[in-house]
Amino acid sequence: MTEMPAALEFDSVSKEYRSVFSRQCLRALDGFDLRVEAGEIFGFLGPNGAGKSTAIHIAMGFMRPTSGQGHMLGRPFGDAWTRRHVGFLAENVALYHRRVDRLLCFYGALNRMGGTRLGERAREVLQMVGLQDQAKRNAGKFSRGMLQRAGLAQALMNDPKLLILDEPTSALDPLARVMVRELIRSAREAGKTIFLSSHLLSEVELICDRVAVLHRGKLVRLGRTADLLQSTEQTEIVTRGVALQDFAGAVTHDGVVSITVPISTQRGVMQRVWELGGEIVSVNPVRRSLEQVFLEVTADSQPPQTDGRL
Amino acid sequence: MLLIAFNFVREQRWPIFVLLLWVLLLAFLGLVADIPRMREDLLFLFKQVAVYVVAFSIFFGGSAIYNERKSRRILAVLSKAVRREQYLSGLVLGVTTACGIYCFALGLTGSWTLGAAGFPISRVWFLMVCLVAACMLAGTVALMFSTFLNPFLAAGATALMLGVPWIASQTVAARWAYVIPVSALTTTVLNSTFNVPGNTEWFPVCLAVLETAVFWVIAAKIFSRVDIAVAVE
Ligand SMILES: Nc1ncnc2c1ncn2[C@@H]1O[C@H](COP(=O)(O)OP(=O)(O)O)[C@@H](O)[C@H]1O
Ligand SMILES: [Mg+2]
């Protein structure tokens, strides 16, 4: 069996935005390396302005990297013919003001789709994104959320092998988010690769196999979603029958007291709980929120690192 | 492929089309006020309305890419299996078609009104072909500049590029007008008196088509290199 080419591969890609008039120069991406394997759901995280969209736009061939290169489905970035197998949803998507079904046919036709299949597929994808009742409405009159659904439909028209979504759920209501999640899951079941950027971890952690965290154009974390969220430094000890004031930083809820401590001291704390006549319900590694991950990432500007447990 | 690209341009041109139809209405008004004594005025009006279209083509060509970028719609199109040069050909075709429809309508009204006013109208269609060729070339030049300049500068640069040969033709030698034959073609239209059949000179038309191809190649070369950096918010 030959090795499958990566679905998406960045090879020390850098991008500088230069302003024409001032000599200002902004490094949006800095030696960015990433390999997204075929068939995975990959979450691309980072605070606003981290360079996520920049990386995606380079992959789509809208821009050229200042240095470095990359491949998409085994072909260099910017190759038009490869894009036939790629679905792309831009951040704040904008579409032409036409009837949605015709619009979808137009975008499908740009990918060399044709014939009766085109109309059928348009109906299919409208169904998939829950716009089947709006098929005859003009996309110019859509709300942001509906537009985003239409954008998603447009990206799905060609039944892409690789689906690149730039903040796909930013304008969606909770119900629509669930829909997108289901859509992404079923796409993976069909063997597709999904690369989605977001600044919301709650979205990503539910569906992504792996995530990368980008900060100021640098890759700062890369690993399985669960690993990223699991702090290696802290544990939460849930106890019963102890007084809240006996432990600094303890919180109580549902009749239990939970104490968060560094791993190095967890043994001592557990012993104290027992000494005080308490009972230990559970000891769990602390799950961090993305905010914490971001904060950590911003605090230490160490070179890109990879979590060892890949 | 080109058809689809051009279809999309046409789609986007609807509002401007309405504008063009309004200008056409002006020509119709000339018809309503059909007095034989006004025939010179009618001719003047016809030529005026005819030459506007060249300005429109510069406007179309210069702003097409900018608008698409500004509205971020370009992303959904370029994310498909569309090469940059194909996109550009679509725009050239779109601009030409927009102007072509205008010229066709103008040709119809022109041959009707001027015919009614007693002018020999055999040359109207030839002049319209000249106009379309001029528009195609002017639009392509504007498009080329707009790949790296903003629409105002692109329109300015285009006007300069088309204007210089015209000035040279007025001051240095008449054949300068043929360097970029837009001015030659428009002056053909402007100088046409319709009183005599006049000679039908296809040379500038062919030259315009040829130069369109050249500018298209240059534009495609530049455009495939530029970054489509859309507005960030
Ligand atoms: N067209 C542009 N011109 C200049 N700077 C830009 C442009 N697009 C993005 N940037 C800058 O590049 C950085 C990364 O932006 P972006 O990739 O959009 O971030 P993200 O998508 O992660 O929020 C930001 O600091 C942004 O200001
Ligand atoms: Mg972004």
Image: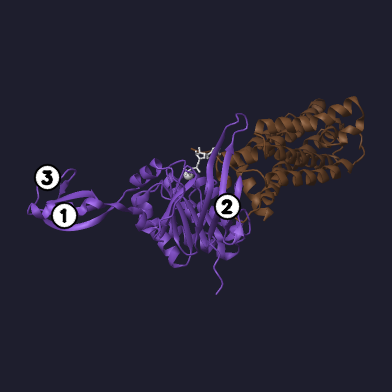
Chain colours: A purple, B brown
- Between residues A17 and A85, which one lies in front from this camera angle? A17
Asked whether mark 3 and ligand 1 are closer than 8 Å, the reply comes as: no
Please report contact status of discs 2 and 1: CB closer than 8 Å, yes or no.
no
Ligand 1 closer than 8 Å to label 1 CB: no
Q: CA distance from mark 2 to mark 1?
A: 57 Å
Q: Which of B137/A174 is in front?
A: A174
Q: Is residue A101 visible in the rendered structure shown here?
A: no
Let me know if marks 2 and 1 both belong to one chain.
no
- Judged left or right of residue A277, residue A248 is right
Question: Helix or strand or loop: what does disc 1 sit on?
Answer: helix
Residue A197, position as x, y percentages in the image: 45, 50
* Badge 2 density bin: few <14, some 14–19, many ≥20, Cα 10 Å: many
Judging by the rendered image, the residue that carries numbered circle 3 is: A246
Residue A237, how many percent across, how many down? 19, 53
For residue A230, side relative to residue A127 (left or right): left
Assess whether mark 1 and mark 3 are in contact (beta carbons under 8 angstroms). no
**Which is closer to the viewer, label 2 or label 1?**
1
What's the amino acid at mark 2? Ser
Labels 3 and 1 share a subunit: yes
> According to the image, label 1 marks what residue?
A270
Mark 2, residue position: B79
Q: Residue at x 70, y 40 (%)?
A: B143
B189 versus A4 height, above or below: above
Q: Are marks 2 and 3 in contact (CB under 8 Å)?
A: no
Few, some or many residues within 10 Å of mark 3 (<14, 14–19, 20+) = few
Task: Answer with mark 3 or mark 1, whichever residue precedes in sequence.
Answer: 3
The chain identifier of the residue carrying mark 2 reads B
